[in-house]
Amino acid sequence: MARDSLEAALRARRIAVEGAQRALALALAAEAEVAVAVSKATETIRQETETAVSSTGGDAAVEAFAAWLPRGLAERERARRTLAQAEGTTSQARAALSAARLAEGAVEALVQGRLINERLIAERRSQAALDEMALGRHRDRRRRQQARET
């Protein structure tokens, strides 16, 4: 029964590690996607600033930029907040994977300990059988020797 329960626990731990790996992969992908959105928002602000300050844009371009800038900054700030949340999610996913791997390692150590114990028991039984056989031979020799002496 102990063997089955340890093997079942090990299977469950391995499934948990696989799930944690998938969750981390999804979190990393989401974080990368949001990082791209932050970069795009930052690049858009840079391009719009260049356009507004260029001599060919004129007053209309500067006025349009001034009207647009609060929205652009707000968009970049939303993207940054979303990125911070995604980074937090990724951090939690990493911690969950680490915990799952530790739990898997603990069960693997129990399984290894059980195997070592079973090997030791088998070796002790084998040695006991050899000892018993040697003791039987010794007794037989002793009886034969005593029989010769009498």
Image: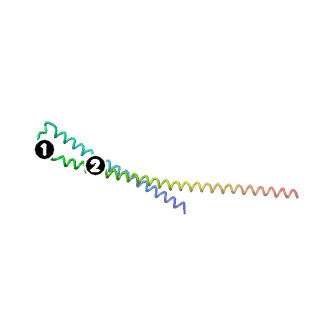
Crowding at dot 2, Cα within 10 Å, few <14 / some 14-19 / many 20+, comes out as: some
Residue closest to the far left: 59
Q: 18 or 55, which lies in front?
A: 55
Q: How many numbered marks, from 0 up?
A: 2
Q: Which residue is mark 1?
A: 63
Mark 1 secondary-structure assignment: helix
Three-letter code for the amino acid on which mark 1 is drawn: Glu
At 65% from the left and 56% from the top, the residue drawn is 124
Residue receiving disc 2: 80
Q: Nearer the viewer, residue 112 or 88?
A: 88
Q: Residue at x 35, y 49 (%)?
A: 28
Image x and y of residue 81, in percent: 28, 51
Please report whichever mark, 2 or 1, sits nearer to the chain's N-terminal start.
1
Q: Quadrant of residue 66?
A: top left
Name the one closer to the observer, 90 or 12. 90
Q: Position of residue 56 (x, y in %)?
A: 13, 37
- Percent position of residue 64, x then y: 14, 45
| Amino acid marked by disc 2 | Arg
Q: Which colour style is shown?
A: rainbow
Q: Quadrant of residue 128?
A: bottom right
